[in-house]
Amino acid sequence: MATVNQHPLSIVAEIKAGSKAALNEKLTVMGKDPAANPEIPFGQVPTLHFSCFVIIDQEADKYPTYLVFESNFDGDLDAHLDQLLAVGQAGFDALFSHCVGYTPGSSADQLKAYMRSHSSPAAAFYVGCRGQTVQDIQNAIAVREEVENYLDSEQAKEGLDGLPAQAILEKIQAHLGKPGVVSPKISSETLPQLRSRAKRNIVLMVLFGLPILVLTFPLLILWLVIFRLTEIRDNHKKPLPPLPVDPRLFENPDVHTISHLTTMVAVKPGAIRWFTLKGVLAITSLLAKTVSIYGNLLGIPTIHFARWIMMDGNKRMLFFSNYDGSWASYLGDFVDQAKYGLTAIWGNTTRFPPSKWLAFGGAANIIQFKEWSRQHNVYAPIFYRAYPSATIANLLKDIEIRDNVGRSMSESEAAAFLLGF
């Protein structure tokens, strides 16, 4: 079975003058029930993992105000757009009617063309459960729940007393083989295979990267010196005034298993900053595709999807992330596990805590970093989750259970497998 990959869709459309308030009101109403609202029932889109709508109005005196639609989806873009419009054409039409260049009442083909023409590529994109479609993930959850319910039922009847682990596993396998019971759909590439591929990719990157590093070493030293001088100059500039914080962002903290983060930042001016940010994002993209492919991004095990998008002629950068837990714990994960990579990216943006030698300082200043995040977060009136109660850690566990429940095991392997329940 061929692997179906996950992709990002980011539609960025300028909002017409005077339309922001009406558009925000409409989004707020739709966001009360993202899965089943009558205008765009996202829960009826089978390829959709997560999606959101945000209004970007930061620094409105310098830049247009935008409506941005984020989607994390399986497979082909055309098929995904067709599915979105099949259930929500009227809703998308109503929203984009507030945007520049869109003709209200357009046909499905015209609306689809508008969405495609306003899509922005991701400079880097990360997937937590790589190769797992929405249906694959729901199947893994269903298999684990079925096995748990079966074991609970058998234990209540004392039907497992005294049985060895292998015998219990055989009973589970027989139960899953019955008509009407959920059937495990094994991954085309299992988690152990993904881990092996990541290790192989690390070896290949070292083998190919070392010669390139040696050849370009003088240029890298020159770049680093210039970059450090730029840091010193920027760190001595007068701090910019703080930005207002949207109170809606923190009205209901810690109420969801899976949360959403949108961050909009301005890139520091200068060719060296632009060149460095592009380079760091290219490295991040490469690592996300080759090494961070089994539920862990730079040491952070709580991210489902993440993307970085350059906007406004590379003068601003938009970041979307769907993650487990609260905003505070998520930022804590960043600082504890990935502060160097975090600083290497966002240290090239305005108001970020001062960095040293690209990756040091910056996010390590936790109080300043959290305040920077508050000021640059963007409220999402609509945020849809296809599996709202499943953390990355639980999903990886469910996938391993689903992929292994049907195979033959030794007594010790079966005993270890059953400890997962």
Image (cartoon, rainbow, N blue to C red):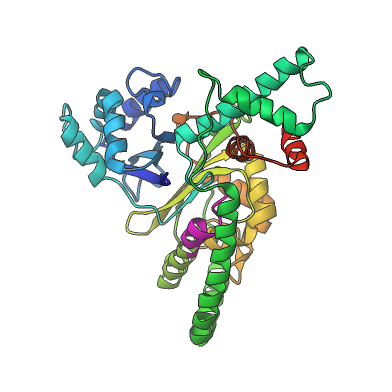
Q: Left of 194 or right of it: where is 12?
A: left
Q: Quadrant of the C terminus?
A: top right
In reply to whether residue 176 is colored magenta, the answer given is no
Which quadrant of the structure image shows residue 405?
A: top right
Question: Residue 251 location, x and y as percent?
Answer: 58, 27
Residue extending furthest toward the top:
157
Please say if 99 is above or below 263.
Answer: above
Total numbered labels: 0
Q: Is residue 180 left or right of residue 199?
A: left
* Residue placed furthest toward the right: 162
| Residue 247 visible in the displayed image | no
Task: From the viewer's side, name the closer residue of 133 and 341.
Answer: 133
Residue 44 place in picture, x, y as percent:
38, 24
User: Which range of residues does the magenta coloring cover?
Assistant: 283-296
Please name whichever residue, 300 or 390, is drawn nearer the observer in this view of the structure.
Answer: 390
Q: Which quadrant is home to the N terminus?
A: top left
Q: Residue at x 46, y 32 (%)?
A: 135
Q: Residue at x 51, y 56 (%)?
A: 288
Image quadrant of residue 341? bottom right
Is residue 286 visible to the viewer in this orientation of the structure?
yes
Vertical order, 30 against 109 (above or below): above
What residue is at 44 percent from the left and 20 percent from the top? 33
Q: Position of residue 202 (x, y in %)?
A: 57, 66
Between 41 and 54, the residue placed more toward the observer is 41
Residue 289 among those drawn in magenta: yes
Left or right? Give the position of 10 relative to 105.
Answer: right
Counting from the top left corner in percent of width and height, residue 205 is at 53, 70
Please name the residue shown 53% across and 58% down the image: 346
